[in-house]
Amino acid sequence: MITLFLVKSLDRTIIIAVAILLALAVLVPALNLLTAPDHPLHVPIYLVSLFGKYLTYALLALALDLVWGFCGILSLGHAAFFALGGYAMGMYLMRQIGARGSYGNPLLPDFMVFLNWKELPWFWYGFDMFWFAALMVVLVPGLLAFVFGWFAFRSRVNGVYLSIITQAMTYALLLAFFRNDMGFGGNNGLTDFKDILGFNIQAAGTRTALFAASALALATSLVITSGIVRSKFGKVLVALRDAESRTRFLGYRVEHMKLFAFTVSAMMAGVAGALYVPQVGIINPGEFAPGNSIEVVIWTAVGGRGTLVGPIIGAILVNGGKSIFTAAFPEFWLFALGGLFVLVTLFLPKGVVGTFQQYLARRRAYCVAARKNEEAELAAAEPTAAE
Amino acid sequence: MTEKKPRSLLYLDGVSVSFDGFKALNSLSFVVEPGELRAIIGPNGAGKTTMMDIITGKTRPDEGEVFFKGGIDLTNKDEAEIAQLGIGRKFQKPTVFESHTVWDNLELALNRSRGVFATLFYRLTGEDKARIEEILSTVRLTARRDDPAADLSHGQKQWLEIGMLLAQEPELLLVDEPVAGMTDAETTETAVLLKEIAKTRSVVVVEHDMGFIRDLGVKVTCLAEGSVLAEGSIDFVSNDAKVIENYLGR
């Protein structure tokens, strides 16, 4: 059953994309670790981490595309799930510091000692174990999405109203995580990480491994998402996106369908956040900022919503542009981003990938029509030739 | 009335509903027998669409009883549940899934389990395939099976939607203005198709086109101001003084 589901998920674009990601997962670490720094093919470590970060953004955009592109839920709060996954990973990394913090407390992270806390809050228990933290990375965002979606979809909150409450959700979390007594490091967040799974987080080996893990996570999620959207369930998602009440009158429980997609998407966003944090070395409440979630929407729109590789390409293009732009003309980046969104909405409503696919489809239809015409001409010419 | 309940397929008694003080239905009572084809006429605002909304669970009645297949109370169920019980509905405006192909539209409508995991791991069996092909030929869309529904003409969309209702295998079919915007030829064909469908299930048709209703040749119910004005054959109803005054015009 599962294998059939996975086999069905593969079409040419997905196979190519997965192959590229797997090749990157092997090649980039190899080019960093096995070549001398002055070798022309050497990939400097800062670039490895930078592109690793882009891959986690791409995973976040893919997660958003599952709900926005295929299910019509414009979530303006997806960065919240990303940040929650990041915090779960951050808590594990904090507990790995142990007695090496500035205050040398073997149990309490530095910020708790600074706040004069005497014991570890209950919700920090278990985060010294990687498997537990890894479980929380998917469970916490998944649970929040499930509860949030349960109420929102059951009350049939749709369209703009839904977008607004997702935005309110991430804003509420932003304010909550800013408070020191929440127990997540307040304003400063969690940082000064030392080890992950016993490996030094600054070492080139660890950072290339994190890059490879990001590429693998993205490839796996791509296959899963593709399996979902190509199944009959995926067809129901598109159906309810286009005509929700019609889908209901066919007997589908629309709220269950949306809830499943929304929860899976939140879990993927959580994984993205968990891979992001060790690569950038910090997680703070700023990740919950409403603007972050809106940026994810822009990446997805630029790449092409409703296509699977679109959001991945969009996230890498826009963030690559951001890295170059903010270094060259820092004050103009926001104008460029805003302008980009306006231009894409006006001239490329299907995004880069969607427009390209449309072009291919049109050319194919043109070729088919041309062949038919030729055949018809031949058929018309034949009787005269026979005479 | 109570002894009639177990035998009839659909049973509405004393149903009233009002929107912001406007009484859309005023203690409406209405019975459909198994295997019956029934036409409903009435002026705008008579409550025809509201009645369908009540039966399919889109609107809840303020008072009154709605029973399906004898004992199933429809007033406490939602759209998806009622659809799964076997009531299909066709809207006035054809609503098909435009970005899906004709084939996928029918596959989605097919009467199979509709849960999240059942659809996630669904496999098109030979039986389902044969059923879809059969419906495609019934609604004459075999040649368009791989085209997106958006590319169909208005009449073809209406037919696709009727095909989707067939795929749903309902016991009761509610059809709202099936021939609106159709050519005369299409209208005649649709009457034939509906009569064909009514052989195996009950059908309720709401229509304004009197010629079409005459083609159907069935029992007619005339609604006005939220309740039944007259019921009987088309000739009986169209000669009724109240119907002429309210609907057909003097």
Image (cartoon, coloured by chain):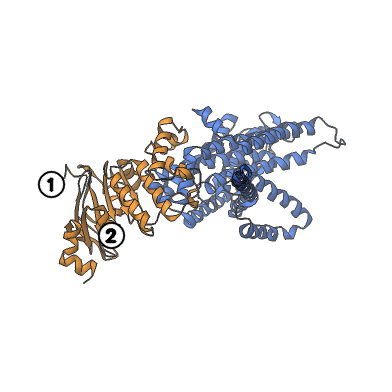
Disc 1 crowd, CA 10 A, few/some/many (<14, 14-19, 20+): few
- Same subunit: marks 2 and 1: yes
Label 2 lies in what chain? B
The answer to whether residue B157 is visible is yes
- At horizontal 28% and vertical 64% (from top left) the residue drawn is B45
Decide if residue A141 is on the left or right side of residue A97. Answer: left
Q: Which x, y percent locates residue B188?
A: 33, 54
Q: Return the residue found at the far bottom.
A: B250
The front one of B67 and B160 is B160
Mark 2 residue element: helix
Q: CA distance from mark 2 to mark 1?
A: 36 Å
Query: On the rendered image, what quadrant is the C terminus of chain A found in?
Result: top right
Q: Which x, y percent locates residue B150?
A: 49, 52
Label of residue B87 in the image: none
Give the blue chain's letter.
Answer: A
Decide if residue B76 is on the left or right side of residue B186. Answer: left
Q: Which x, y percent locates residue B34?
A: 21, 43
The front one of B185 and A286 is B185
**Residue that badge 1 annotates:** B2
Nearer the camera: disc 2 or disc 1: 2
**Residue that badge 2 annotates:** B211
The front one of A277 and B37 is B37
Give the orange chain's letter.
Answer: B
Q: Amino acid at mark 1?
A: Thr
